Amino acid sequence: MYNEKFTHEVSRRLRGLFGTSKLGMPIPPIERHRLEGFMQAGIFLGLSSKAELAQLMEEIHFDIFGKTIAEHRAQAPLSWVFEEVDYSLYESPAYERTHQES
């Protein structure tokens, strides 16, 4: 039940952001970051996987733009608003990261 609600909400937010982008309007960074954080929380809570969310994003992007994300990036690299963030640094405890940086 929660998985479906989560997926529905991610879909709603992605459609809103992609729709705004298609209209040529800038997407406020705060909205993009909220969605990214929401998606990360869903992964953390086990409501979805990174692969499932990537597939969902791909499907919605294709529905709205009529092209894949890769095609969109290749044709208009500056208009792509979602960058892939590598969170692997944060998979270890903070006290370990502090000693690794020194």
Image (spheres, grey):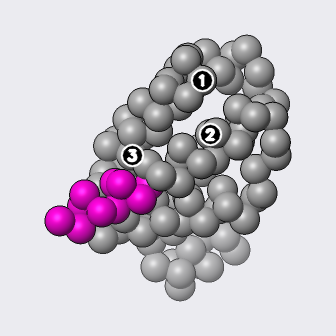
* Distance (Cα) linking label 1 and label 2: 8 Å
Q: 77 and 17: which one is in front?
A: 17
Image x and y of residue 23, in percent: 75, 34
| Dot 2 amino acid type | Phe
Secondary structure state at the residue bearing disc 3: helix
Could you tell which of marks 1 and 2 lies nearer the N-terminus? 2
- Crowd class of label 2 (few under 14; some 14 to 19; many from 20; radius 10 Å): many
4 versus 45 height, above or below: above
Q: Is residue 39 magenta?
A: no
Q: Which residues are magenta?
A: 1-10
Q: Residue at x 67, y 61 (%)?
A: 31
Is any atom of residue 47 visible in this view?
A: no
Where is the C terminus found, in terms of image quarters?
bottom right
Residue at mark 3: 53
Residue at mark 2: 18
Q: Is residue 8 magenta?
A: yes
| Dot 3 amino acid type | Leu
Q: Are marks 1 and 2 in contact (CB under 8 Å)?
A: yes
| Dot 1 amino acid type | Phe
- Crowd class of label 1 (few under 14; some 14 to 19; many from 20; radius 10 Å): some
Residue at mark 1: 65
Secondary structure state at the residue bearing disc 2: helix
